[in-house]
Amino acid sequence: MSKNHLVICDIDGMRYPSNEMRTQWDGLVVHKKNYTSRHPQDLIKSIPDDTSVSPVRMEAADVFVSGAEDITFGLVDEFNNPVVSENGEYIQCPPTSGELYNDSDIPVGTF
């Protein structure tokens, strides 16, 4: 009895003597002409990326600039209190539309 039996190749489906067969890295039994070794790039270990975050500054608190003017009292501060002059009088708002400016001088549209 011969030890050289026929084996079917997993790549091309042909029968070959067992002494011409090899087992690939992925488990396929193939003829020596169909044999491919594992690619060297498959064996490279990757270097993990540094995912740490550099020191982070907290976002500064929002600062609201009070440019709001109350028509009743005149100018107001950031706490909505009327602004009073040194002699105790309320500081009046500057004139609004039409008194200092022509309505045609005020730009209209989206900016």
Image (cartoon, grey):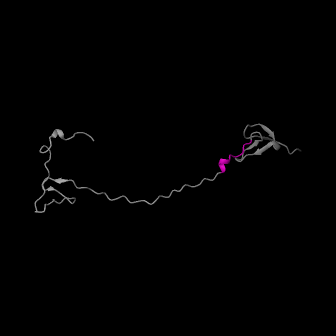
In magenta stretch: residue 67:
no
Indicate the quadrant where residue 60 lies. bottom left
Q: Which residues are magenta?
A: 35-43
Image quarter hosting the N terminus: top right
Q: Residue at x 15, y 43 (%)?
A: 101
In magenta stretch: residue 37:
yes
Give the vertical position of 63 relative to 42 (above or below): below
Depth check: 40 or 94 in front? Answer: 94
Residue 93 percent location from the top left of the image? 14, 52
Residue situated furthest right in the rendering = 1
Residue 111 percent location from the top left of the image? 27, 41
Q: Residue at x 65, y 48 (%)?
A: 42
Q: Residue at x 17, y 38 (%)?
A: 104
Give the vertical position of 30 relative to 53 (above or below): above
Residue 44 percent location from the top left of the image? 64, 51
The reply, left or right, for residue 15 in relation to residue 48 is: right
Q: Residue at x 77, y 36 (%)?
A: 14
Indicate the quadrant where residue 21 lies. top right
